Each structure stands twice: as structure tokens, then as C-alpha cells.
Image (cartoon, rainbow, N blue to C red):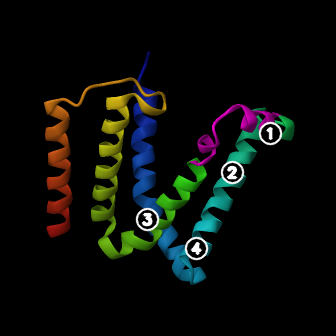
Amino acid sequence: MNLIFPILIAIFSGLAMSIQPGINSLLGKSLESPWLASTVSFLVGTIVLALTAFALGEMKSASFLVQTAKENPWWIWTGGLLGAIVVTSALVFAPKLGATSWLALFLFGQVLTSILLEKWGILGFPEKPISLQKWVGMGLLILSAWLVRKG
């Protein structure tokens, strides 16, 4: 499998994640509310995603969505909630911590959670043991967050 495209998209997503807190923070200041800014951010994203799904012919009927909700655990629908927490956290706290510090701490949280999800094979991820290299990587992430915060 060619991994160049997924790698480039992952890098682009990282670039977008670095820019997004600043953009949303400016929106929050303009609207005088981090909550309203998060709402607008998600509304714009929802519109773009709905148009994309429509353009790709992937729109589903209401009955399909209801059936899917009945057949699956309730928590699979919480991704938007988690996204709202991330966006609002970035919007509120990135300006206080600085873009680099916030992102370093955000990355630490992501990697730590990913290691634990893989350790126990949770959410469909393959089981992978926590190796010495992973512990060293986590230590380096903590050190980098600290160094970035100090610098």
C-alpha cells in the first residue's frame, strides 16, 4: 500500500491543527464568545462536510441513520462532542499557553492515549505492547513540552 498520500494528509492535518486555534481565537474575540466561535466553527465544518458527502453521493436517509443508531453503541456518536472539546480548548487556552505549548501538550495527550488504546486493542486498534521505545518517546514529548514552555 502506498503511504505517501496518507502521510501527506496527516502532515497537512497537523498544519491545519496548528493554525486552527489562532483562527478560532480571533473569531472568538470578534464574536466576544468562545462558545459562539466554536459553534460557528462547527457549523461551517458541518456545512462543508454535508456538501462533500452530497457531492460524493454518500448522503443517507433519516431511516438509515435511525437504524444505525439502534444497531450500535451510543458512544460511537460522541466524536462531535470530543471535537467540540478540542476546538473550544484550543480556542480558549492556546492564546494563554501559546500555540507551540498548547500543541505540544495536545500532542502529548494524543500519543499517550494512542499508546493506551493500542495496548489493550480498544476501539478497533490492533493490540501493541508498550515498548521501551514508546516510553522513551513519551519522555521526549514531556521534555519537549517543557522545553517549549520554557523557551
Residue 115 percent coordinates (x, y)? 31, 37
* Nearest to viewer (mark 2 / mark 3): 3
Q: Distance between the residues labelled 2 and 1?
A: 23 Å
For disc 2, the marked residue is: 48
Amino acid tagged 1: Val
For disc 4, the marked residue is: 35
> Which comes before the other along the chain, label 2 or label 3?
2
* Nearest to viewer (mark 1 / mark 3): 1
Q: Quadrant of residue 138?
A: top left
Residue 122 percent coordinates (x, y)? 43, 32
Amino acid tagged 3: Ala
For disc 1, the marked residue is: 66
Dominant secondary structure of the residues highlighted in magenta in the image: helix
Q: Which one is nearer the viewer's eye here, 135 or 33?
A: 135
Q: SS at mark 4? A: helix
> Which comes before the other along the chain, label 4 or label 1?
4
Disc 1 crowd rating (10 Å Cα; few below 14, some 14-19, many 20+) is few
Residue 52 percent coordinates (x, y)? 71, 42
Can residue 139 be seen at all in this image of the molecule?
yes
The range drawn in magenta is 64-78
